[in-house]
């Protein structure tokens, strides 16, 4: 047997973008703590607070919704794990670095040490920072490819991980395929059975919270491994959910999600026990849509450019700041965490950071009468892009085709209305082109992308060695879905 430790994932908070390098003086009152809990593959319609007839049990998520604000139009920047996490920590669209798919155990880091992250920004403001859970953003192993994809030997060292990006503490694992290898700080410290991983993460997270003191602000990023595969609920939760026939007809799926929800509950309990809850902003959300099956009324699921791939639950509780039981229908993005954090602490973000992050403070406070985002960009695992503004969503498929949907009247994206809305298409295309050309979607000095993006028939960076074939037929929806399913089975993302 192997040692067990448990860790919940941090909830997400979007940020307002402010530019300048020097931190401002801290406010006289105690700075608020921030916890960002990131569920893995939690679909929009899975919590009962989002879909009352859901068969899945999520009592702590639902409780959080009654205590805080539930967002109905929250989105990830990507439809799979790695690129979404890049956006969460940097506030930058992952398409700007060409990251559409997921990394593996031995993938190199995709966030360079010099780039400002949520953690480094808050650490500079005196925050204790911790990342506990699934990293999935790459790291440099001192010994090239020690062990194998599923198990790296104890003692193996790495650099370029969370500690290089502003986190005082890292305790976690690389990704789902390597769930049995536990890393602490810069080295592998234990091997555990798959079902022991999440309890180990929770244990470490609760221990860390128990060491926090009032007046000493902290940031906890808690990326859970639930309800992502492997579906390995602990004995404590086996058979307890009563949910069946979900995701590959696996009756354990409901138990697995119930365990993840209980982890969130334990984090909330730790805040209460340590008298930290009243000064803590806690966000619970997901890194992309549900696996294999969309939940009505959304179209498609994880990996897809359609709503089921990137529209996610997003719940924020902040006593005294966020109205309990409130619902917000404005469009937000998980990228918004860094801008939100910067406004909370009064720090300024340099021009070369948080390029696509907008503060959520006006949304959380209820001051925003209309959405705070000009527009939001999405991407699929296949390399498709989309831009959303108001009710309109324009999709630029990698194969060159385009689609336009009015989400106000057609949330399920069943009717492509591109033919009758030429002016809308022109406006959104121009806006998307400006976002690409400027290297940012917010105000500030223009930046350079690290990838040659294109919306005129694919991403140039992926096509430099491929000749375009004139008159090539476009792939059908069925063919594209089959390709995505095959990629999913191969990557275990």
Image (cartoon, rainbow, N blue to C red):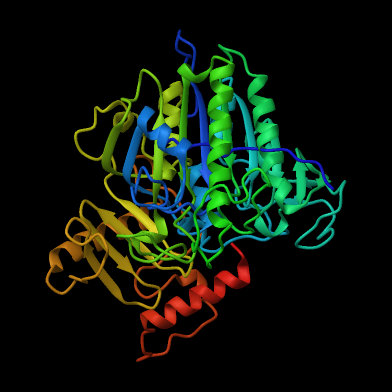
Q: Vertically, is 10 above or below 128?
A: below
Q: Position of residue 370 (x, y in %)?
A: 20, 38
> What residue is drawn where x is 38% and y is 66%?
300
The foreground one among 197 and 190 is 197
Residue 121 or 478: which is nearer the viewer? 478
Q: Quadrant of the C terminus?
A: bottom right
Does residue 381 appear to the left or right of 137 in the view shown?
Answer: left
Identify which residue is drawn at 70% across, 33% down. Answer: 204
Across and down, in percent, residue 186 comes to 78, 41
Q: What is the residue that sits farthest to the top in this orientation? A: 28
Q: Residue furthest bottom?
A: 471
Depicted 237 relative to depicted 26: above or below: below
Which residue is rendered at x = 66% and y = 54% of the image?
232
Q: Where is residue 159 drawn, in percent x and y?
A: 75, 45
Q: Is residue 201 left or right of residue 87?
A: right
Q: Nearer the viewer, residue 128 or 97?
A: 128
Q: Quadrant of residue 308?
A: bottom left
Residue 54 position in % (x across, y down):
39, 52
In the displayed structure, does residue 444 sit left or right of residue 12?
Answer: left
Q: How many marks?
A: 0
Residue 463 appears in the rendering: no
Residue 140 in view of the camera: yes
């Amino acid at each position: 047997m192997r040692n067990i430790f448990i860790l919940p994932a941090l909830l997400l908070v979007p940020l307002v973008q402010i530019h300048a390098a020097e931190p401002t003086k801290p406010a006289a009152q105690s700075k608020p703590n921030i916890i960002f809990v990131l569920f893995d593959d939690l679909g929009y319609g899975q919590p009962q607070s989002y879909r009352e007839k859901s068969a899945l049990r999520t009592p702590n998520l639902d409780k959080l919704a009654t205590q805080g604000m539930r967002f109905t139009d929250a989105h990830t920047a990507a439809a799979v794990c790695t690129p979404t996490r890049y956006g969460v920590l940097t506030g930058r669209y992952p398409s700007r670095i060409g990251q559409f798919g997921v990394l593996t155990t031995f993938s190199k880091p995709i966030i360079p040490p010099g780039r400002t992250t949520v953690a480094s920004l808050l650490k500079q403001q005196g925050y204790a920072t911790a990342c506990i859970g699934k990293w999935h953003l790459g790291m440099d192993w001192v010994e090239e490819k020690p062990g194998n994809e599923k198990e790296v030997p104890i003692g193996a060292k790495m650099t370029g991980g969370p500690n290089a990006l502003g986190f005082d503490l890292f305790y976690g694992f690389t990704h789902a395929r390597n769930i049995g290898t536990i890393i602490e700080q810069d080295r592998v410290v234990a091997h555990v059975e798959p079902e022991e991983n999440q309890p180990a993460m929770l244990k470490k997270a609760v221990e860390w919270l128990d060491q926090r003191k009032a007046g000493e602000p902290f940031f906890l990023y808690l990326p859970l491994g639930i309800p992502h595969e492997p579906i390995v609920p602990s004995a404590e939760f086996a058979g307890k959910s009563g949910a069946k026939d979900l995701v590959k007809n696996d009756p354990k799926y409901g138990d697995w999600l119930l365990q993840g929800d209980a982890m969130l509950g334990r984090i909330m309990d730790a805040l209460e026990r340590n008298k930290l809850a009243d000064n803590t902003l806690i966000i619970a959300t997901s890194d992309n849509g549900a696996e294999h099956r969309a939940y009505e009324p959304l179209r498609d699921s994880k990996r897809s450019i359609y709503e089921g791939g990137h529209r996610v639950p997003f719940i924020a509780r902040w006593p005294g700041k966020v109205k309990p039981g409130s619902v917000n229908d404005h469009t937000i993005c998980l990228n918004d965490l860094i801008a939100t954090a910067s406004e909370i602490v009064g720090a300024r973000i340099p021009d070369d950071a948080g390029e696509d992050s907008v503060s959520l403070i006006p949304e959380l406070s209820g001051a925003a009468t209309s959405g705070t985002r000009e527009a939001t960009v999405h991407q699929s695992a296949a390399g498709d892009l989309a831009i959303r503004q108001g009710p309109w969503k324009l999709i630029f498929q990698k194969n060159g085709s385009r689609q336009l949907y009015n989400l106000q009247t057609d949330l399920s994206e069943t009717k492509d209305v591109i033919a009758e809305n030429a002016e809308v298409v022109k406006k959104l295309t121009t806006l998307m082109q400006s976002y690409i050309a400027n290297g940012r979607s917010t105000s500030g000095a223009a930046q350079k992308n690290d990838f040659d993006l294109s919306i005129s028939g694919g991403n140039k960076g992926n096509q430099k060695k491929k000749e375009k074939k004139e008159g090539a037929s476009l792939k059908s929806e069925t063919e594209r879905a089959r390709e995505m399913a095959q990629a999913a089975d191969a990557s275990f993302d």
